[in-house]
Amino acid sequence: MKGYMLIGGEKIFKDKEIEILFPYDNSVVGTIPDGDEEDARRAVDAAIKGFEKMKELTAYDRYSILSKAARILSNRSYEIAELLTKEVGKTIRESMGEVGRAVNTLTLSAEEAKRITGEEVNFDAAPGIRGKVGFYRRVPLGVIGCITPFNFPLNLTCHKVGPALAAGNSVVIKPSENTSLVVIKLAEILIEAGFPPEAVNVITGYGEKVGDALVRDERVRMITFTGSVETGKIIMSRGGLKKYAMELGSNAGVYVDKDQLVRLDFVSEKICRGGFALAGQVCISVQRVFVHDSLFDDFINRAVEFTKTLKIGNPLEETTDMGSVIDVQAADRIMEWIEEAVSAGAKVVCGGKRLSDTVIEPTIVINVPEDVRLFIGEVFGPVIVVNRVKSVDEAIEKVNLSRYGLQAGIFTDDLRAAFKFSEEVEAGGIMVNEIPTFRVDQMPYGGVKESGIGREGPLFAIEEMTEIKTICFDINF
Ligand code: NAP
Protein backbone atom coordinates (compact mmCIF):
# COMPACT_ATOMS: atom_id res chain seq x y z
CA MET A 1 0.00 0.00 0.00
CA LYS A 2 1.18 3.51 -0.85
CA GLY A 3 2.31 5.44 2.21
CA TYR A 4 1.25 8.93 3.24
CA MET A 5 2.10 11.88 5.47
CA LEU A 6 -0.45 13.41 7.79
CA ILE A 7 -0.91 17.18 7.48
CA GLY A 8 -3.93 18.85 9.08
CA GLY A 9 -5.60 15.42 9.24
CA GLU A 10 -5.26 14.96 5.48
CA LYS A 11 -3.39 12.00 4.00
CA ILE A 12 -0.72 13.41 1.67
CA PHE A 13 0.60 11.05 -1.03
CA LYS A 14 3.52 11.79 -3.35
CA ASP A 15 4.91 10.21 -6.48
CA LYS A 16 8.41 10.18 -5.05
CA GLU A 17 8.57 7.55 -2.32
CA ILE A 18 11.05 5.88 0.06
CA GLU A 19 10.83 2.15 0.77
CA ILE A 20 10.83 0.97 4.37
CA LEU A 21 12.60 -2.38 4.72
CA PHE A 22 12.45 -5.11 7.38
CA PRO A 23 16.11 -4.94 8.51
CA TYR A 24 16.27 -8.71 9.16
CA ASP A 25 15.73 -9.80 5.55
CA ASN A 26 15.34 -6.58 3.54
CA SER A 27 11.73 -7.35 2.55
CA VAL A 28 9.58 -4.28 1.88
CA VAL A 29 7.32 -3.27 4.79
CA GLY A 30 5.78 -0.24 3.10
CA THR A 31 6.57 3.15 1.62
CA ILE A 32 6.56 6.76 2.78
CA PRO A 33 6.46 9.95 0.72
CA ASP A 34 9.82 11.65 0.16
CA GLY A 35 8.80 14.98 1.71
CA ASP A 36 10.35 18.36 0.92
CA GLU A 37 10.48 22.00 2.06
CA GLU A 38 6.95 22.67 0.79
CA ASP A 39 5.55 19.79 2.90
CA ALA A 40 7.33 21.11 5.99
CA ARG A 41 5.91 24.59 5.36
CA ARG A 42 2.36 23.23 4.92
CA ALA A 43 2.67 21.19 8.10
CA VAL A 44 3.72 24.26 10.08
CA ASP A 45 0.81 26.25 8.52
CA ALA A 46 -1.54 23.52 9.74
CA ALA A 47 0.09 23.38 13.18
CA ILE A 48 -0.39 27.15 13.64
CA LYS A 49 -4.13 26.62 13.10
CA GLY A 50 -3.89 23.56 15.37
CA PHE A 51 -2.39 25.67 18.15
CA GLU A 52 -5.38 28.05 18.00
CA LYS A 53 -7.72 25.04 18.31
CA MET A 54 -5.68 23.63 21.21
CA LYS A 55 -6.45 26.85 23.11
CA GLU A 56 -10.11 25.82 23.18
CA LEU A 57 -9.32 22.63 25.13
CA THR A 58 -9.28 22.69 28.93
CA ALA A 59 -6.65 20.87 30.98
CA TYR A 60 -9.30 18.23 31.67
CA ASP A 61 -9.99 17.84 27.92
CA ARG A 62 -6.28 17.31 27.24
CA TYR A 63 -6.11 14.80 30.10
CA SER A 64 -9.14 12.89 28.76
CA ILE A 65 -7.91 12.80 25.17
CA LEU A 66 -4.41 11.61 26.09
CA SER A 67 -5.91 8.95 28.39
CA LYS A 68 -8.18 7.79 25.56
CA ALA A 69 -5.21 7.65 23.15
CA ALA A 70 -3.36 5.47 25.69
CA ARG A 71 -6.35 3.09 25.83
CA ILE A 72 -6.62 2.85 22.02
CA LEU A 73 -2.88 2.16 21.75
CA SER A 74 -3.11 -0.49 24.44
CA ASN A 75 -6.01 -2.22 22.67
CA ARG A 76 -3.97 -2.35 19.45
CA SER A 77 -0.73 -3.52 21.15
CA TYR A 78 0.04 -6.58 19.06
CA GLU A 79 -0.64 -4.96 15.68
CA ILE A 80 1.55 -1.96 16.57
CA ALA A 81 4.30 -4.19 18.04
CA GLU A 82 4.43 -6.26 14.86
CA LEU A 83 4.90 -3.11 12.79
CA LEU A 84 7.63 -1.94 15.19
CA THR A 85 9.49 -5.23 14.75
CA LYS A 86 9.21 -4.99 10.97
CA GLU A 87 10.49 -1.40 10.86
CA VAL A 88 13.21 -1.56 13.56
CA GLY A 89 14.27 -5.24 13.48
CA LYS A 90 13.92 -5.54 17.29
CA THR A 91 12.37 -8.71 18.69
CA ILE A 92 8.62 -8.99 19.08
CA ARG A 93 9.07 -9.23 22.87
CA GLU A 94 11.04 -5.96 22.82
CA SER A 95 8.35 -4.37 20.66
CA MET A 96 5.57 -5.43 23.05
CA GLY A 97 7.66 -3.86 25.81
CA GLU A 98 7.96 -0.62 23.87
CA VAL A 99 4.20 -0.44 23.23
CA GLY A 100 3.57 -0.95 26.97
CA ARG A 101 5.98 1.87 27.80
CA ALA A 102 4.39 4.17 25.19
CA VAL A 103 0.96 3.57 26.80
CA ASN A 104 2.53 4.52 30.13
CA THR A 105 4.21 7.64 28.71
CA LEU A 106 0.89 8.87 27.29
CA THR A 107 -0.84 8.11 30.60
CA LEU A 108 1.85 10.01 32.56
CA SER A 109 1.48 12.93 30.14
CA ALA A 110 -2.31 12.88 30.64
CA GLU A 111 -1.83 13.04 34.42
CA GLU A 112 0.64 15.92 34.13
CA ALA A 113 -1.87 17.90 32.03
CA LYS A 114 -3.85 18.42 35.26
CA ARG A 115 -0.85 19.68 37.22
CA ILE A 116 0.52 22.53 35.08
CA THR A 117 0.44 25.49 37.46
CA GLY A 118 2.31 28.62 38.48
CA GLU A 119 2.47 30.43 41.82
CA GLU A 120 2.07 33.80 43.46
CA VAL A 121 4.86 36.35 43.02
CA ASN A 122 5.53 38.47 46.16
CA PHE A 123 5.96 41.79 44.34
CA ASP A 124 5.99 43.81 47.59
CA ALA A 125 9.15 42.06 48.76
CA ALA A 126 11.09 44.67 46.72
CA PRO A 127 11.81 48.03 48.40
CA GLY A 128 9.17 50.69 47.79
CA ILE A 129 6.60 48.39 46.14
CA ARG A 130 3.06 48.47 47.54
CA GLY A 131 -0.35 47.40 46.30
CA LYS A 132 0.85 45.01 43.62
CA VAL A 133 -0.34 41.40 43.55
CA GLY A 134 0.08 38.75 40.94
CA PHE A 135 1.28 35.39 39.87
CA TYR A 136 2.98 33.51 37.07
CA ARG A 137 1.49 30.85 34.84
CA ARG A 138 2.99 28.26 32.52
CA VAL A 139 1.72 28.80 28.97
CA PRO A 140 2.33 26.67 25.85
CA LEU A 141 5.00 27.72 23.36
CA GLY A 142 3.02 27.20 20.15
CA VAL A 143 4.29 24.89 17.40
CA ILE A 144 6.85 22.29 18.50
CA GLY A 145 8.95 20.31 15.99
CA CYS A 146 9.61 16.75 17.19
CA ILE A 147 12.47 14.90 15.45
CA THR A 148 12.89 11.26 16.46
CA PRO A 149 15.36 8.39 15.84
CA PHE A 150 14.85 4.85 14.59
CA ASN A 151 15.50 2.79 17.72
CA PHE A 152 12.39 3.53 19.87
CA PRO A 153 10.19 5.29 17.32
CA LEU A 154 6.98 4.86 19.30
CA ASN A 155 7.92 5.54 22.91
CA LEU A 156 10.40 8.31 22.14
CA THR A 157 7.81 10.07 19.97
CA CYS A 158 5.33 9.75 22.88
CA HIS A 159 7.96 11.39 25.12
CA LYS A 160 7.73 14.45 22.86
CA VAL A 161 4.11 14.65 21.69
CA GLY A 162 2.63 13.52 25.03
CA PRO A 163 4.04 16.43 27.09
CA ALA A 164 3.72 18.89 24.17
CA LEU A 165 -0.01 18.22 23.77
CA ALA A 166 -0.58 17.95 27.54
CA ALA A 167 0.72 21.53 27.80
CA GLY A 168 -1.49 22.79 24.94
CA ASN A 169 1.05 23.02 22.10
CA SER A 170 0.63 21.69 18.56
CA VAL A 171 3.25 19.45 16.94
CA VAL A 172 4.94 18.63 13.64
CA ILE A 173 6.70 15.27 13.90
CA LYS A 174 9.58 14.21 11.63
CA PRO A 175 10.30 10.54 12.38
CA SER A 176 13.35 8.58 11.16
CA GLU A 177 12.84 7.62 7.52
CA ASN A 178 13.45 3.99 8.53
CA THR A 179 10.62 3.88 11.06
CA SER A 180 7.89 6.35 10.06
CA LEU A 181 4.89 4.03 9.62
CA VAL A 182 4.42 3.39 13.33
CA VAL A 183 4.61 7.14 14.05
CA ILE A 184 1.84 7.83 11.52
CA LYS A 185 -0.31 5.23 13.33
CA LEU A 186 0.39 7.00 16.63
CA ALA A 187 -0.65 10.38 15.16
CA GLU A 188 -3.88 8.83 13.82
CA ILE A 189 -4.62 7.42 17.28
CA LEU A 190 -4.10 10.86 18.89
CA ILE A 191 -6.52 12.42 16.38
CA GLU A 192 -9.04 9.57 16.78
CA ALA A 193 -8.89 10.17 20.55
CA GLY A 194 -9.95 13.79 20.04
CA PHE A 195 -7.05 16.19 19.37
CA PRO A 196 -7.69 18.69 16.55
CA PRO A 197 -6.25 17.11 13.35
CA GLU A 198 -4.28 20.31 12.67
CA ALA A 199 -2.50 19.92 16.03
CA VAL A 200 -0.84 16.58 15.18
CA ASN A 201 1.11 16.55 11.91
CA VAL A 202 3.65 14.06 10.57
CA ILE A 203 6.04 14.82 7.73
CA THR A 204 8.14 12.02 6.26
CA GLY A 205 11.36 11.83 4.28
CA TYR A 206 15.05 12.54 4.75
CA GLY A 207 16.34 14.56 7.67
CA GLU A 208 18.60 16.70 5.51
CA LYS A 209 15.64 17.83 3.39
CA VAL A 210 12.27 17.83 5.13
CA GLY A 211 13.79 17.76 8.65
CA ASP A 212 16.06 20.69 7.87
CA ALA A 213 13.14 22.75 6.54
CA LEU A 214 11.23 22.15 9.79
CA VAL A 215 14.28 23.16 11.85
CA ARG A 216 14.80 26.39 9.89
CA ASP A 217 11.14 27.51 10.04
CA GLU A 218 11.05 30.57 12.30
CA ARG A 219 7.44 29.89 13.28
CA VAL A 220 8.50 26.70 15.08
CA ARG A 221 9.12 27.74 18.70
CA MET A 222 11.03 24.66 19.83
CA ILE A 223 12.81 21.65 18.38
CA THR A 224 12.80 18.61 20.61
CA PHE A 225 15.31 16.20 19.12
CA THR A 226 16.45 12.67 19.94
CA GLY A 227 19.29 11.28 17.85
CA SER A 228 23.03 11.44 17.33
CA VAL A 229 25.37 14.17 18.59
CA GLU A 230 26.37 15.01 15.02
CA THR A 231 22.78 15.67 13.90
CA GLY A 232 22.02 17.54 17.13
CA LYS A 233 24.88 19.95 16.49
CA ILE A 234 23.75 20.56 12.89
CA ILE A 235 20.19 21.27 14.04
CA MET A 236 21.29 23.78 16.69
CA SER A 237 23.54 25.57 14.22
CA ARG A 238 20.73 25.99 11.69
CA GLY A 239 17.56 26.48 13.69
CA GLY A 240 18.18 30.01 14.95
CA LEU A 241 16.23 31.63 17.76
CA LYS A 242 14.10 28.90 19.33
CA LYS A 243 14.19 26.51 22.27
CA TYR A 244 15.98 23.17 21.97
CA ALA A 245 15.83 19.89 23.86
CA MET A 246 18.64 17.54 22.82
CA GLU A 247 18.57 13.85 23.78
CA LEU A 248 21.77 12.53 22.23
CA GLY A 249 24.07 9.52 22.22
CA SER A 250 26.32 7.80 24.73
CA ASN A 251 28.74 4.93 25.38
CA ALA A 252 27.61 4.08 28.89
CA GLY A 253 30.11 2.75 31.42
CA VAL A 254 29.51 0.37 34.33
CA TYR A 255 31.86 -0.74 37.14
CA VAL A 256 31.85 -4.12 38.91
CA ASP A 257 33.53 -3.74 42.31
CA LYS A 258 35.78 -6.28 44.04
CA ASP A 259 33.08 -7.47 46.50
CA GLN A 260 30.71 -8.79 43.78
CA LEU A 261 32.02 -12.37 43.42
CA VAL A 262 28.98 -13.84 45.22
CA ARG A 263 26.59 -12.19 42.77
CA LEU A 264 28.66 -12.50 39.63
CA ASP A 265 26.17 -14.75 37.78
CA PHE A 266 23.42 -12.19 38.27
CA VAL A 267 25.62 -9.14 37.56
CA SER A 268 27.27 -10.55 34.42
CA GLU A 269 23.90 -11.63 32.97
CA LYS A 270 22.39 -8.22 33.69
CA ILE A 271 25.30 -6.41 32.08
CA CYS A 272 25.16 -8.60 28.96
CA ARG A 273 21.42 -8.07 28.65
CA GLY A 274 22.08 -4.31 28.90
CA GLY A 275 24.62 -4.53 26.09
CA PHE A 276 22.69 -6.78 23.72
CA ALA A 277 19.06 -5.60 24.10
CA LEU A 278 17.84 -4.29 20.76
CA ALA A 279 21.18 -5.47 19.31
CA GLY A 280 22.91 -2.75 21.31
CA GLN A 281 20.97 0.07 19.64
CA VAL A 282 19.86 1.80 22.82
CA CYS A 283 21.28 5.21 23.81
CA ILE A 284 21.99 3.80 27.29
CA SER A 285 23.25 0.39 26.12
CA VAL A 286 26.06 -0.96 28.26
CA GLN A 287 29.13 -0.39 26.09
CA ARG A 288 32.13 -0.05 28.41
CA VAL A 289 32.44 -2.44 31.37
CA PHE A 290 35.18 -1.98 33.97
CA VAL A 291 35.73 -4.97 36.22
CA HIS A 292 37.91 -5.11 39.32
CA ASP A 293 41.11 -6.99 38.54
CA SER A 294 40.46 -9.64 41.20
CA LEU A 295 37.30 -10.95 39.51
CA PHE A 296 37.98 -10.12 35.86
CA ASP A 297 38.45 -13.74 34.67
CA ASP A 298 35.41 -15.00 36.61
CA PHE A 299 33.32 -12.19 35.13
CA ILE A 300 34.42 -12.95 31.57
CA ASN A 301 33.75 -16.70 31.95
CA ARG A 302 30.23 -16.09 33.18
CA ALA A 303 29.48 -13.34 30.63
CA VAL A 304 30.62 -15.59 27.75
CA GLU A 305 28.65 -18.55 29.11
CA PHE A 306 25.46 -16.46 29.34
CA THR A 307 25.90 -14.75 25.95
CA LYS A 308 26.19 -18.13 24.21
CA THR A 309 22.66 -19.01 25.44
CA LEU A 310 21.09 -16.07 23.56
CA LYS A 311 19.00 -17.05 20.55
CA ILE A 312 19.82 -14.89 17.54
CA GLY A 313 17.50 -14.86 14.55
CA ASN A 314 14.18 -13.75 13.12
CA PRO A 315 12.87 -11.04 15.46
CA LEU A 316 9.26 -11.91 14.61
CA GLU A 317 9.63 -15.29 16.42
CA GLU A 318 8.58 -15.21 20.08
CA THR A 319 11.66 -17.10 21.28
CA THR A 320 14.27 -14.87 19.61
CA ASP A 321 16.47 -12.89 22.04
CA MET A 322 18.28 -10.65 19.56
CA GLY A 323 17.54 -9.56 16.00
CA SER A 324 19.36 -7.43 13.46
CA VAL A 325 20.84 -3.95 13.43
CA ILE A 326 19.06 -1.28 11.42
CA ASP A 327 20.86 -1.58 8.06
CA VAL A 328 23.89 -2.86 6.16
CA GLN A 329 25.83 0.41 6.62
CA ALA A 330 25.44 0.17 10.40
CA ALA A 331 26.64 -3.46 10.35
CA ASP A 332 29.65 -2.53 8.16
CA ARG A 333 30.64 0.21 10.60
CA ILE A 334 30.28 -2.01 13.69
CA MET A 335 32.44 -4.76 12.12
CA GLU A 336 35.05 -2.18 11.14
CA TRP A 337 35.22 -0.89 14.73
CA ILE A 338 35.69 -4.45 16.09
CA GLU A 339 38.47 -5.12 13.56
CA GLU A 340 40.18 -1.82 14.41
CA ALA A 341 40.18 -2.71 18.14
CA VAL A 342 41.57 -6.18 17.44
CA SER A 343 44.38 -4.75 15.28
CA ALA A 344 45.23 -2.42 18.17
CA GLY A 345 45.61 -5.37 20.57
CA ALA A 346 42.09 -6.12 21.89
CA LYS A 347 40.78 -9.70 22.00
CA VAL A 348 37.34 -11.00 21.00
CA VAL A 349 36.30 -13.61 23.60
CA CYS A 350 32.75 -14.20 22.36
CA GLY A 351 30.95 -13.64 19.03
CA GLY A 352 32.59 -11.25 16.60
CA LYS A 353 31.09 -12.79 13.44
CA ARG A 354 28.61 -11.34 10.99
CA LEU A 355 25.79 -13.84 10.38
CA SER A 356 24.13 -11.92 7.52
CA ASP A 357 24.02 -8.43 6.03
CA THR A 358 22.48 -7.00 9.19
CA VAL A 359 22.90 -9.66 11.91
CA ILE A 360 26.04 -9.55 14.08
CA GLU A 361 26.70 -12.03 16.89
CA PRO A 362 26.58 -10.57 20.41
CA THR A 363 30.24 -9.79 20.93
CA ILE A 364 32.48 -9.35 23.98
CA VAL A 365 35.87 -7.68 23.44
CA ILE A 366 38.46 -7.44 26.24
CA ASN A 367 41.55 -5.32 26.90
CA VAL A 368 40.44 -2.61 24.49
CA PRO A 369 42.90 0.31 24.06
CA GLU A 370 41.42 3.66 25.03
CA ASP A 371 42.19 5.36 21.73
CA VAL A 372 40.12 3.14 19.41
CA ARG A 373 36.60 3.93 18.24
CA LEU A 374 35.11 0.97 20.13
CA PHE A 375 36.13 2.73 23.35
CA ILE A 376 35.79 6.39 22.34
CA GLY A 377 32.72 6.34 20.09
CA GLU A 378 29.15 5.13 20.41
CA VAL A 379 29.11 1.64 18.85
CA PHE A 380 25.28 1.35 18.72
CA GLY A 381 25.60 -2.38 18.02
CA PRO A 382 25.78 -5.68 19.95
CA VAL A 383 29.28 -5.22 21.33
CA ILE A 384 30.54 -4.76 24.88
CA VAL A 385 34.06 -3.78 25.85
CA VAL A 386 35.42 -5.22 29.13
CA ASN A 387 38.59 -3.78 30.67
CA ARG A 388 40.33 -4.29 34.04
CA VAL A 389 40.62 -1.64 36.75
CA LYS A 390 42.26 -1.74 40.19
CA SER A 391 39.96 0.52 42.24
CA VAL A 392 36.78 2.55 42.26
CA ASP A 393 38.91 5.67 41.65
CA GLU A 394 40.31 4.18 38.48
CA ALA A 395 36.81 3.10 37.40
CA ILE A 396 35.52 6.66 37.85
CA GLU A 397 38.41 7.99 35.78
CA LYS A 398 37.74 5.48 32.98
CA VAL A 399 33.97 5.99 32.92
CA ASN A 400 34.61 9.74 32.65
CA LEU A 401 37.01 9.17 29.77
CA SER A 402 34.21 9.94 27.31
CA ARG A 403 32.72 12.90 25.52
CA TYR A 404 29.32 11.50 26.51
CA GLY A 405 27.51 11.45 29.86
CA LEU A 406 24.00 10.00 29.73
CA GLN A 407 23.88 7.30 32.43
CA ALA A 408 26.42 5.13 34.28
CA GLY A 409 26.24 2.24 36.75
CA ILE A 410 28.12 0.61 39.62
CA PHE A 411 27.69 -2.80 41.30
CA THR A 412 29.07 -2.71 44.84
CA ASP A 413 28.23 -3.41 48.49
CA ASP A 414 30.48 -0.58 49.62
CA LEU A 415 28.39 2.47 50.50
CA ARG A 416 31.40 4.75 50.34
CA ALA A 417 32.33 3.53 46.83
CA ALA A 418 28.72 3.90 45.65
CA PHE A 419 28.53 7.45 46.94
CA LYS A 420 31.90 8.47 45.53
CA PHE A 421 30.98 7.01 42.13
CA SER A 422 27.62 8.79 42.05
CA GLU A 423 29.22 12.10 43.08
CA GLU A 424 32.18 12.01 40.71
CA VAL A 425 30.94 10.33 37.54
CA GLU A 426 29.78 12.90 35.00
CA ALA A 427 26.38 11.66 33.81
CA GLY A 428 22.71 12.65 33.84
CA GLY A 429 21.81 9.50 35.83
CA ILE A 430 23.73 7.09 38.09
CA MET A 431 22.40 3.59 38.75
CA VAL A 432 23.67 1.88 41.90
CA ASN A 433 23.46 -1.93 41.73
CA GLU A 434 21.68 -1.56 38.41
CA ILE A 435 22.85 -1.25 34.81
CA PRO A 436 22.99 2.18 33.12
CA THR A 437 20.35 0.89 30.69
CA PHE A 438 17.68 1.23 33.39
CA ARG A 439 15.03 3.85 32.72
CA VAL A 440 11.44 4.36 33.80
CA ASP A 441 9.44 6.88 31.85
CA GLN A 442 8.52 9.26 34.68
CA MET A 443 12.08 9.86 35.84
CA PRO A 444 14.11 12.88 34.72
CA TYR A 445 16.17 11.58 31.83
CA GLY A 446 18.89 13.26 29.79
CA GLY A 447 22.60 13.83 29.56
CA VAL A 448 25.56 16.03 30.38
CA LYS A 449 28.57 16.77 28.15
CA GLU A 450 27.78 15.80 24.53
CA SER A 451 24.87 13.58 25.58
CA GLY A 452 22.51 16.50 25.50
CA ILE A 453 20.61 19.44 26.87
CA GLY A 454 17.40 19.30 28.91
CA ARG A 455 15.48 16.47 30.52
CA GLU A 456 12.64 14.23 29.36
CA GLY A 457 10.00 12.45 31.43
CA PRO A 458 6.59 14.16 31.03
CA LEU A 459 6.84 16.39 34.13
CA PHE A 460 10.27 17.67 33.08
CA ALA A 461 9.53 17.91 29.36
CA ILE A 462 6.48 20.06 30.14
CA GLU A 463 8.78 22.56 31.90
CA GLU A 464 10.82 22.77 28.69
CA MET A 465 7.72 22.99 26.49
CA THR A 466 6.07 25.90 28.33
CA GLU A 467 6.95 29.53 28.89
CA ILE A 468 6.46 31.44 32.11
CA LYS A 469 4.06 34.39 31.86
CA THR A 470 4.01 36.84 34.77
CA ILE A 471 0.79 38.71 35.55
CA CYS A 472 0.78 41.69 37.92
CA PHE A 473 -2.25 43.70 39.20
CA ASP A 474 -2.05 47.13 40.82
CA ILE A 475 -4.86 46.90 43.37
CA ASN A 476 -4.76 50.64 44.17
CA PHE A 477 -5.50 51.65 40.58
P1 NAP B 1 20.17 10.44 13.64
O1 NAP B 1 20.84 9.89 12.46
O2 NAP B 1 20.80 11.58 14.35
O3 NAP B 1 18.69 10.81 13.21
C1 NAP B 1 17.70 11.24 14.10
C2 NAP B 1 16.62 12.00 13.35
O4 NAP B 1 17.15 13.23 12.85
C3 NAP B 1 16.08 11.25 12.12
O5 NAP B 1 14.71 11.49 12.03
C4 NAP B 1 16.84 11.92 11.01
O6 NAP B 1 16.28 11.78 9.73
C5 NAP B 1 16.83 13.36 11.47
N1 NAP B 1 17.81 14.23 10.80
C6 NAP B 1 18.98 13.89 10.22
N2 NAP B 1 19.60 15.00 9.73
C7 NAP B 1 18.80 16.05 10.01
C8 NAP B 1 18.87 17.45 9.76
N3 NAP B 1 19.92 18.02 9.14
N4 NAP B 1 17.87 18.24 10.19
C9 NAP B 1 16.81 17.72 10.83
N5 NAP B 1 16.67 16.40 11.09
C10 NAP B 1 17.66 15.57 10.70
O7 NAP B 1 19.98 9.28 14.76
P2 NAP B 1 19.50 7.77 14.55
O8 NAP B 1 20.55 7.01 13.85
O9 NAP B 1 18.10 7.73 14.02
O10 NAP B 1 19.42 7.30 16.09
C11 NAP B 1 20.53 6.86 16.78
C12 NAP B 1 21.07 7.94 17.70
O11 NAP B 1 20.06 8.42 18.56
C13 NAP B 1 22.16 7.40 18.63
O12 NAP B 1 23.20 8.33 18.72
C14 NAP B 1 21.44 7.28 19.96
O13 NAP B 1 22.27 7.31 21.09
C15 NAP B 1 20.52 8.45 19.91
N6 NAP B 1 19.42 8.27 20.86
C16 NAP B 1 19.40 9.04 22.00
C17 NAP B 1 18.38 8.84 22.92
C18 NAP B 1 18.28 9.69 24.17
O14 NAP B 1 17.20 9.72 24.75
N7 NAP B 1 19.32 10.36 24.59
C19 NAP B 1 17.40 7.86 22.70
C20 NAP B 1 17.48 7.09 21.53
C21 NAP B 1 18.48 7.30 20.61
P3 NAP B 1 16.79 10.58 8.76
O15 NAP B 1 15.91 9.47 9.05
O16 NAP B 1 16.72 11.07 7.40
O17 NAP B 1 18.23 10.30 9.14
Image (cartoon, rainbow, N blue to C red):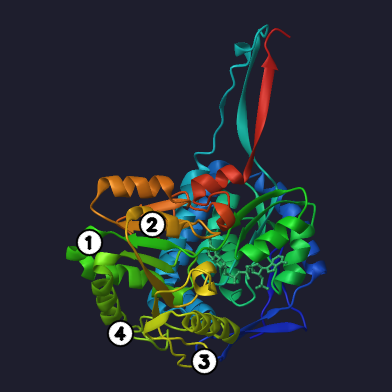
At 38% from the left and 60% from the top, the residue drawn is 438
Q: Amino acid at mark 2?
A: Glu
Q: Is residue 153 left or right of residue 217?
A: left
Q: Position of residue 72 (x, y in %)?
A: 47, 64
The earlier-in-sequence mark between 1 and 3 is: 3
Residue picked out by circle 3: 25
Picture quarter with ligand 1: bottom right
Q: Report which residue position mark 4 lands on.
A: 308
Q: Considering the numbered disc 1 on the image, is that residue within a helix, a strand or a loop?
A: helix
In the rendered structure, which amino acid carries the disc numbered 3? Answer: Asp
The residue that label 2 is drawn on is 394
Asked if marks 1 and 3 touch (Cβ < 8 Å), the reply is: no
Q: Report, in whole angstroms, how far the alpha carbon at label 3 lies from the one at label 2.
A: 43 Å
What is the crowding at mark 2: few (fewer than 14 residues within 10 Å), some, or many (at least 20)?
A: some
For disc 1, the neighbor class at 10 Å (few under 14, some 14 to 19, many from 20) is some
Quarter of the image where one finds residue 78: bottom left
Answer left or right for 175 relative to 305. Answer: right
Q: Secondary structure at mark 3?
A: loop
Which dot, 4 or 2, sits closer to the camera?
2
Q: Residues within 10 Å of mark 3 (few under 14, many from 20)?
A: some
Q: Amino acid at mark 4?
A: Lys
Label 3 CB less than 8 angstroms from ligand 1:
no
Quadrant location of the C terminus in the rendered image? top right
Is residue 49 something that shows in the picture? yes
Tell me if the residue at label 1 has its CB under 8 Å from ligand 1. Answer: no
Q: In the displayed structure, would residue 329 be above or below residue 438?
A: below
Residue at the extreme right: 38
Q: Residue at x 32, y 83 (%)?
A: 310
Q: CA distance from mark 1 to mark 4?
A: 22 Å
Q: Nearer the viewer, residue 460 or 269?
A: 269
What residue does disc 1 label?
260
Q: Nearer the viewer, residue 246 or 316?
A: 246
